[in-house]
Amino acid sequence: MFGKRGAALTLGSLLLVGSSLVWAPAGRAGTGRHEDHEGGFLCTGSSRSHYDPPLVLEPRLTRVRADVTYSSCTVRPGRTVAATSSFDGVSPAASCLTLSGGSGEETVQYADGHHSLIVYDSSRILRAAGVLALVQSGRVTEGRGKGHPARRTITGAPRELPTDCLAPGLRDGDNEVQLEIQP
């Protein structure tokens, strides 16, 4: 209906609105007493998700594991580092057509040697023009940003229903990811 350009515009608008509502201005990042651990910061990147059991048309309890590459984490003004992470979680009713939030844990390893452990305990789904965004909320329990709220937004571009959803099921998927550690 909208084509690839319209979907990309919608996805970009959804991300802009979401990030402007939840992320602190860059001028507030790193204003705490210890280097860049006290203020908010933002990471962007992509992920490869693995589903067990594979996603099919019928919703079912599914374990989700994702390997994430954050190409850019702005941990304070003028300081950007790359990071990688692993996410492990459970979705109570996931399928190729729907997704329910669930809970999970993400371990982030920053290129400068720091880390963060984030526990997500709530989520919500946003849809616009076929674009699906899963927004997970939680808290950093150790490492960089400890004690601060965290929000992880995973977006998937619209695509045709894969024939793998019929049988044997969709085992993997690629998505864009944004991680926000709030001040």
Image (tube, helix red, strand yellow):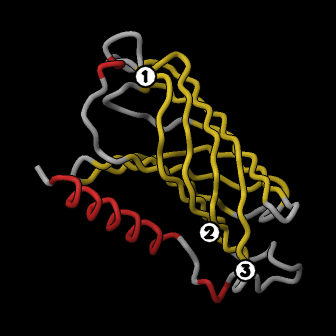
Q: Is residue 134 above or below residue 89?
A: below
Residue beneath label 3, please? Answer: 76
Q: Position of residue 112 (x, y in %)?
A: 84, 65
Q: CA distance from mark 3 to mark 1?
A: 39 Å
How many neighbours does mark 1 have within 10 angstroms: few (below 14), some (14-19), or many (20 or more)?
A: many
How many neighbours does mark 2 have within 10 angstroms: few (below 14), some (14-19), or many (20 or more)?
A: many
Q: In which quarter of the view is residue 60 placed?
A: top left
Residue beneath label 1, please? Answer: 170
Q: Does the CB distance between marks 3 and 2 fall below 8 Å?
A: no
Secondary structure state at the residue bearing disc 2: strand
Residue beneath label 2, please? Answer: 42
Q: CA distance from mark 2 to mark 1?
A: 30 Å
Q: In which quarter of the view is residue 143 placed?
A: bottom right
Amino acid type of the residue tagged 2 in the rendering: Leu
Q: Is residue 37 left or right of residue 159?
A: right
Q: Does the CB distance between marks 3 and 1 fall below 8 Å?
A: no
Q: Position of residue 159 (x, y in %)?
A: 28, 39
Q: Quadrant of the C terminus?
A: bottom right
Q: Residue at x 43, y 27 (%)?
A: 94
